[in-house]
Image: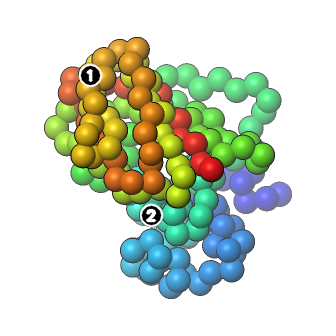
Amino acid sequence: MPDEQKVATPQAAIAASLRRERARAGLSLTEVANRAGIAKSTLSQLESGAGNPSIETLWALCVALDMPFSRLLDPPRPSVQVIRAGEGPVVAAEASDYRATLLAASPPNARRDLFRVTAEPGHARTSEPHMPGAVEHVLLAAGRARAGLVASPVELRPGDYISYPADVVHVFEALESGTWATLMVEYT
């Protein structure tokens, strides 16, 4: 049975995915760690299923391995899938109250991932550039937020939509408690 079908926790899924993608790319632990700007020991721990990585660390690894973020968490799924509010694999940011739950990963012939994002006021979630050509689409469901390019974020209210290049530094900042949005990341 493939690793993806045996995993039960997000950390185990991440570990199996990192090992698989690093092998696919033919890269050493040292090379991937250097490309991602993390310690080799951190990558080794993540590949063994230890630790609780932040979104920032996981994005850096995805960029280093040229892979969509969802490939870290998404095991094979049935053709009909329901994810109830509060369920699903969640990863959190380091410096802000921001969590992303993978809702739908891109199928092999397309490159897009769909997330539910929850955030609370206090610290903006600044994201480093993703893979070249990546675009983020945000549809705000509740609360208020500021999102978009760091140099010119836009204030959003429920029902507002924004898209922006995600291959440059960008931001999502909750302005009210209970803020949540749907986030789709497209990869070209």
Residue type highlighted by circle 2: Ala
Q: CA distance from mark 1 to mark 2?
A: 28 Å
Q: Secondary structure at mark 2?
A: helix
| Horizontal and vertical percent position of residue 89 | 53, 41
Mark 1 lies on a secondary structure that is loop
Q: Residue furthest top?
A: 159
Mark count: 2
Side (left or right) of 74 relative to 133 = right
- Percent coordinates x, y for residue 17 in the rendering: 64, 61
Neighbour tally class for label 1: few under 14, some 14-19, many 20 plus, Cα within 10 Å = many
Look at 48% across and 40% down and name the residue there: 136
Residue behind mark 1: 144
Quadrant of res 152: top left
Which residue lies at the image location 16% right of the left edge and 38% below the top edge?
A: 122
Asked if residue 117 is positioned above or below residue 129 in the image, the reply reads above
141 in relation to 166, above or below: above
> Which disc, if any, is residue 60?
2
Q: Which mark is residue 167?
A: none
Question: Which of 73 and 125 lies nearest the eye of the viewer?
Answer: 125
Neighbours of disc 2 within 10 Å: few (<14), some (14-19), many (20+): many
Q: Position of residue 81 (x, y in %)?
A: 70, 26
